[in-house]
Amino acid sequence: MSVFISAVILPTIWRYLQTLNAAPYFLGLSLSAFSFSGLLAGPLFGFWSDRTLTTKKIILFANVFEMVGNFMYFMGYSKWLLLCSRLVAGIGTGAGSSIFGFLTRNTAPEDRSTVFAAVMACRQAGLLIGPAFNLFLRLCNFQIGPFTVNKYTSPGLFMCLLWILLQFVVLFMYWDFTPQDETCQRNGVEREEVEQEEEEGKPLVGPNELTDSYGTVTSVQSRASSVANGDVTHVSPPPSPPPEEINSSPFKNFSASREFLREEVVVLLAAQFITLFNQTALETMVTPLTQKFFNFGELENSIMYCVCGVEVIAGFLFVRWLSKRVAERVVLAVGLILCNISCVWCLIFLANPQGGFAWQLTEFIIGVFLQVLGLPFVAVAQVSLFSKITSEKTQGFSQGIRRSVGGLATILGPLWAGGLTFNLYIMLGLMMGLLALLTVSPDAHV
């Protein structure tokens, strides 16, 4: 849903800020504010999830911030209120860490890539559907009391209503599933299997009945006879974990330095940072660039984001298929290669577009296509690998740290691009340097 929000507001936020007399750098500030609060909230919600092994209460709590933040965006009295609205709404994205922690705890390692690919495809479906709503939201032009509903403010009201609807859906249609439930269920199944094997394994005649004399059975024979007659359990069922072990804190003996300062973990966190930094920097650059060179408005930008959404969903579905056949390291390598090609293309052709309108538009489309194409490969591979090399008991907190690193990237990316929108050689040069550094890293394909 958070991706859906961004997709709804991205086509119009630039012009919305212009109507509020905001400077160009305010675009970067507004986009970064959403990520900044999510950066702080992610580990906290993840810690909460690991301690309680619940996600429903966390999602319901986080949704409140989304509702309030989007209503503030709808009010839009000033650029500062709009900035604060993005800060408040961003807190709600912290629930994502507990959701990814839940998925990790309840999926087998070999199935994790396909599950994450499917979940991310659903998230990215918002990128497809979100801009499409601007096709009718841009037609809004009426009053609700003191508030004006137009093509700039209507996305905030629309998203606020959707979050309210989601709140009821979660409240009445979602229940937590904890590892204790799974353990009890598994122990019950194993106990039934053991009892069934005992019944099938009983001999029809006891060993003492085969002896020549009656009444001369030794104590050992008596015990054997008792076992054969079912008086003593032949094989005891697997013991259930003691209550104190189930209820013990997952952070007992936990060391953040030991968990996150390992070389392979650092590389995956770097992959998260660099790919999201580049993605958000390009997203920030796109709308001013299309306005300058192609005179795109809200309709054209919405169509562009819809097409990108189709490509992203297709990419995640392909990665889901591919991850069943090759290792995550191969998927990550393919994604990094595609991102490098995209960055080189943008640096050569988009930093200083040449030729007529048709040629410039073709260069732009190819650059965006290549950038979007590489994202699913890197995203799925690094999330799946990260979940496998970090402790399963503290996945909520670990996923919160990972998302905070991504949040830092989505803060710095728009800020970097917002100040260099019309100096693309410097902007794209840094992005290319970071990507090349990650690609040639010795452990880039952990």
Image (cartoon, grey):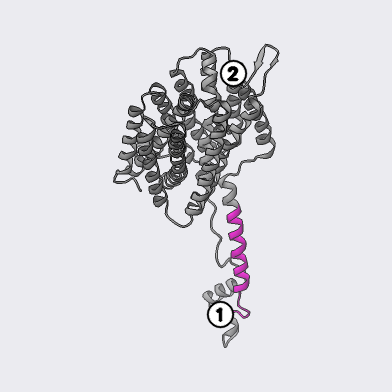
Residue of label 1? 217
Q: Is residue 429 above or below residue 186?
A: above
Q: Amino acid at mark 2?
A: Met
The residue located at (48%, 54%) in the rendering is: 322
Image: magenta residue range: 185-207
Query: Helix or strand or loop: what does disc 1 sit on?
Result: loop
In terms of depth relative to the viewer, which is nearer, 347 or 218?
347
**Where does the image place residue 432, in percent across and percent down from the top left?**
33, 36
The CA span between labels 2 and 1 is 87 Å
**Where does the image place residue 285, in percent across and percent down from the top left?**
44, 27
**Where does the image place residue 3, in percent across and percent down from the top left?**
54, 33
Q: Residues within 10 Å of mark 2 (few under 14, many from 20)?
A: many
**Where does the image place residue 381, in percent across and percent down from the top left?**
44, 46
Q: Is residue 261 left or right of residue 194?
A: left
Task: Farthest residue to the bottom: give it.
Answer: 212
Which callout, 2 or 1, points at the residue further toward the start of the chain?
A: 2
Residue 202 within the magenta-colored segment of the rendering: yes
> Which corner quadrant holds the N terminus?
top right
Q: Amino acid at mark 1?
A: Val
Residue 72's disc is 2
Residue 105 can be seen, yes or no:
no
What count of labels does the image hold? 2
Residue 413: name its quadrant: top left
